[in-house]
Every structure is written in C-alpha cells, then in structure tokens.
Amino acid sequence: MTTESAFQPIAGATALADEAARPYDRRWLAVDDQDCWLEADRAPGLAGLDVSLRFGYLVIRADGMLRLDVPLDVIEDDDSVERTASIGGRDVRVVDEGELASAWFSQWLGRPCRLVKVHPDAGQVAWPA
C-alpha cells in the first residue's frame, strides 16, 4: 500500500497529488515589491490557481485570466535575473520569471508582485511551518 503525497509547485498555491510534481515542490513563489514571500494568508488568490505540469511547463490557470506557461527546467546562466527573496525571515537566492509572469500575478493577486523560483544552487530552503 502506498500513500500519495501532495506537492505545491508554487508555494502557498494549489497542491498536486502527482508524483511527477515532487521535484518541483515549492520551487516557485510569489514575492511582493519588497521581495518578501507572499504566504497564502497575505495572498489568498494563490488558493484559486489551477496548477498543472504539462509537456515541460508549469501551467497556471485562473478564472478570467489567460493561461500562463512557465518552463520547468531552464539552465540558470543569466545573472541579471537573480534576486534575493525573504522566506520566513531568511534570504534565499531566486530567479525572476520575467515581466509577463509579474504582470499576470500582479493582476491576479491585485497587488504588485513577481513570480520567482528558487535558484537550483540555493540549497535547501527552510520553509516556515
């Protein structure tokens, strides 16, 4: 007998009960204009996202919004897109997903924000409980 786990590709958003999502668990997060993680209680719209993995993309849908496709596995070799985000009071190296993702999330969450992903060289993130 196996117990199926749930994984959140976007921290604080809808979880997926799909083993294929395990390597992407909490890889992405929304940050505010101060680069602080928008936890679910500060961004309740995260719970309304429909998130899936399809054909090498993180596919994000929400009512009244066009679909947003974010590549899953990209080699991070452009230092200009690196940032530092605060997660639970700790600085974490992240990669900005760009202006389109920022505009999409800002529109959906009703506040200026950006979609970032944890840099693959950032190490283990100590996510708050």
Image: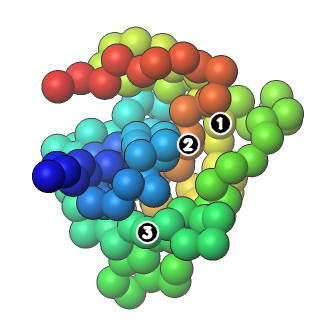
Tell me which numbered mark, 1 or 2, is placed earlier along the sequence. 1
Query: Which sits in the foreground, 57 or 106?
Result: 57
Percent x, y of residue 73: 68, 49
Query: Which sits in the foreground, 69 or 24?
Result: 24
**On the rendered structure, is 56 left or right of 66?**
right
As shown in the figure, which amino acid type bears the numbered disc 3? Answer: Ser
- Can you say whether 51 is above or below 97 in the image? below
Q: Which residue is mark 3?
A: 52
What is the secondary structure assignment of the residue under circle 2? Answer: strand
Instruction: State if disc 2 and disc 1 touch (CB < 8 Å).
Output: yes
How far is the residue under mark 2 from the one under mark 3? 17 Å
- Can you say whether 79 is above or below 113 in the image? above
How far is the residue under mark 1 from the one under mark 2? 5 Å
Q: Which residue is mark 1?
A: 95
As shown in the figure, which amino acid type bears the numbered disc 1? Answer: Val
Asked where in the image residue 20 lies, by quadrant, the reply is: bottom left
Percent x, y of residue 61: 42, 76
Q: Which residue is mark 2?
A: 116
As shown in the figure, which amino acid type bears the numbered disc 2? Answer: Val
